[in-house]
Image (cartoon, helix red, strand yellow):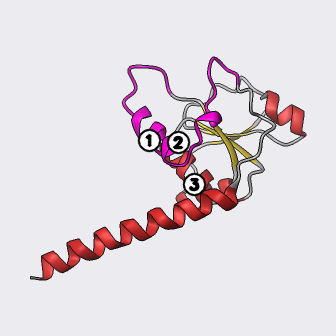
Amino acid sequence: KGLSKEKGIDLILISDNMWKRHDAIYAKAVSPEEFIDLFYNASYVVTNSFHGTAFSINLNKQFFIELPPPPSTRNSRMENILDLFSLRDRLIINGKNEHKNDSIDYESLNRKMEKERRKSIEVLKRIIKEEAV
């Protein structure tokens, strides 16, 4: 909420559990197309999901992550993707992030992402080749 006020942008919450505690636009039961469109058009993203993290990175968005509290088992995937792209500074801890005015260097990150994509494609090609034999 503080980031939206500071930046002068609308806060849009995507969730099926709506408590309407914030002055926000609430998006409930969005389709996959609407979900992607919300990310595509976002100035900033604050998420607690792996998919929100992955879409933010792929769409080159400035984003922050608040990990779900224990005993959540979803955190390891988000932590792994943050570590892969050196984005641990995007974590919100105890409701705060000291890097909220720092921009992500997507030029460097996109080079790393392209390298990771090539590695993934090679693994898939190898698997397909082995299956064809």
**Quadrant in the rendering for residue 44:** top right
Do the residues under discs 2 and 1 have CB atoms within 8 angstroms?
yes
Mark 3 crowdedness (10 Å alpha carbons): few <14, some 14-19, many ≥20: some
Give the x, y percent position of residue 4: 82, 36
Q: Is residue 83 magenta?
A: yes
- Quadrant showing the C terminus: bottom left
In the image, 2: left or right of 111?
Answer: right
Res. 60 in view: no
Q: Residue furthest bottom?
A: 133
* Disc 1 secondary structure class: helix
> Which residue is denoted by mark 2 in the rendering?
82
Between 14 and 117, the one lying in front of the other is 117
* Disc 2 secondary structure class: helix
- Quadrant showing the N terminus: top right
Q: Is residue 86 magenta?
A: yes
Start-end of magenta stretch: 68-96
* Disc 3 secondary structure class: helix
Question: What amino acid type should be assigned to the residue bearing mark 1?
Answer: Asn
Q: Which mark is residue 80?
A: 1
| Above or below, 70 relative to 129 | above
User: Which of the two marks, 1 or 3, is nearer to us in this view?
Assistant: 1
Do the residues under discs 3 and 2 have CB atoms within 8 angstroms?
no
In the image, 67: left or right of 132?
Answer: right
Question: What amino acid type should be assigned to the residue bearing mark 3?
Answer: Phe
CA distance for labels 3 and 2: 13 Å
Between 46 and 121, the one lying in front of the other is 121
Give the x, y percent position of residue 64: 65, 37
Which residue is depicted at the point 42% across and 19% down? 70
Q: Which mark is residue 66?
A: none
Give the x, y percent position of residue 20: 69, 27
Which residue is depicted at the point 47% across and 37% down? 79
Mark positioned earlier in the residue sequence (1 or 3):
3
